[in-house]
Image (spheres, rainbow, N blue to C red):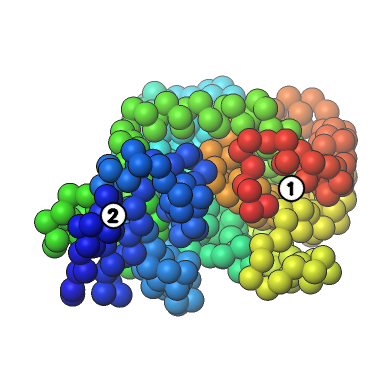
Amino acid sequence: MSILKPDDSAATCCVYQLRSSDLLNTTSVGASNDNDERKSTLGYQTDSSASMNTEEKTSGACIVTWDGPDDPSNPKNWTKGRKWTISLIISAFAFLSPLSSSIAAPALDIIGKELNIPKETELNMVLSIFLLTYALGPFILSPCSEIWGRTRIIRFGNIVFILFTTLCGFAQSKQQITAFRFFAGLGGSATMGMGSGVLADCWRSEERGKGLAVYQLAPVLGPAIGPIAGGYIAQYSTWRWSFWSIVIFNIAIQIIAFLFLDETYPPRILRLKAKALRRSTGHSSFQTEFEMQHRTLPKLLKVSLSRPWLMLATQPIIQALALYQAFNYGMMYLIISSFPSLWEGSYGMPKGQAALNYVSLAAGSLIGVNVSGLLTDLVYKKLKMRHGLLEDEPGVPEFRVPLMIPASIITPCGILLFSWSAQARAHFILPNLGVAIMAGSSMISYQCIGAYIADSYDNYTASASAACCFLRSLGAFAFPLFVPALFGNLGYGWGGSVLVLVAVVIGIPAPLLFWKYGARLRRSSRFSSPKS
């Protein structure tokens, strides 16, 4: 490595040209606004770095940025194999955490008897308290990733998840299992809050659909498969092995993650390279723009705790997307909570056989993710061509909307089929078919919403996702608590009809409004990505 020092008489700031592909280009600058900071970190040329006043030049700061658009250290330039390895590991974590949230569902009555929990609402709380943490965890864990990187926080959160999930299997009281479930969910929420950010770090907009499709399938597939495994475990062993079996699988994934899960957060990667430059050259002037801002955890927490709430309160797009996600996610957990009473009570099936009906949720989700994975990027590219955009130019977020329109119509049809066929105690295939239709269409909408958020709020994806995650998790937490009142008092038919009405009122107009007014709303938002 050779370093060319600038001529002392040529400039008042220090500028270094690095002759090593392993090092980064540096640009001299003393300060920049927030938008320039984000662009420079991602490799864009900014006005503030191009023209500096004398005061900024005399600061002598050398900003470390990417070594051009094809820098191999930039996660977006990694090989497809490396990107898919990261995506699959993150998806595995995102699968196991929701799996734990629902695996105890078939054994709730046994847990109630052993731990003396007589009330059905309190039993459902044992199931859904796990999901409450999904609304709280990302607000704290996501800003921590801005200092220590995404992979460290994901691994730490998974260790917390493993510890308290193990303790769930040793619980001896209602208070213990509720507390252990809460802290296990808090650890598991690390991947749920940062998973989409990891994928956004790796995948470009035009190829993001498939990566997100696999990741977003995991939180839906986990709750569907969990009760199947939990049903047979409860029937042939003890409910405590429901938790311990998850721990065994999670430890295996954790070992793989320690070996192959690389850091993807650009500021963290650049910070490490700047540190290497300072150590190898002896010059302390090498810094990233994030380091120059002197960001600390208290400052980041202050922003993290305020910005998602601000976005949720002021961004109509976030409000609508979050409500729609909350309904879809809450509906899925409501169905999961109602299955034991439906299949064991109304249909008289044993636990193991009753648990097999959760296959409909998994099958519908798989169909939905395959349809969405194939069509999301295809529709996005077609609409780019139709609007005269070049291949390397980003499209607009509204190009994610078209698939949501048929999905929003199909969802209430699936709910209607499930509810009235269950009310009539029709052949078990019919309620399962309704659930599969609802799950598949909800999965399509879920993935389109995730891609829309990533495209709309490129600079604030974590905050926008946290805002949506908050309402979505509250829906998943609260909906199961309505099961006794909804289906117990109204029956499956009329109770389901109430849900259909909500799905029609919220779901069908939403994508049409996004398509027509989305761009106008984003232009008036100070959080919206300039590129969109």
Mark-to-mark CA distance, 2 and 1: 83 Å
Image quarter of the N terminus: bottom left
Q: Which residue type carries mark 1?
A: Tyr
Name the residue furthest front. Answer: 9
**Image point 34% across, 27% down: which residue?**
298
- Mark 2 vs mark 1, foreground winner is 2
**Image point 72% across, 56% down: which residue?**
396
Image position, residue 140 (x, y; %): 41, 33
- Observer able to see residue 371: no
**Image point 22% across, 62% down: which residue?**
7
Q: How crowded is mark 2: few (under 14 residues within 10 Å), some or many (20 or more)?
A: few
Image position, residue 50 (x, y; %): 46, 53
Q: Which residue type carries mark 2?
A: Ala
Image position, residue 476 (x, y; %): 61, 37
Q: Which comes before the other along the chain, label 2 or label 1?
A: 2
Image position, residue 17 (x, y; %): 28, 67
Q: Read off the residue under disc 1.
A: 347
Residue 520: name its quadrant: top right
Residue 275: name its quadrant: bottom left
Q: Residues within 10 Å of mark 1 (few under 14, many from 20)?
A: some
Judge from the rendering whether residue 377 lies leftward or rightward of residue 38; answer left or right. right
**Image point 71% across, 71% down: which residue?**
390
Q: What element carries label 1?
A: loop
Q: What element carries label 2?
A: loop
Judge from the rendering whether residue 18 lies leftward or rightward of residue 43; answer left or right. left
Compare residues 122 and 271 and report the one nearer the observer.
271
Give above or below for 409 relative to 56: below
Judge from the rendering whether residue 411 lies leftward or rightward of residue 78; answer left or right. right
- Observer able to see residue 385: yes
Q: Read off the residue under disc 2.
A: 11
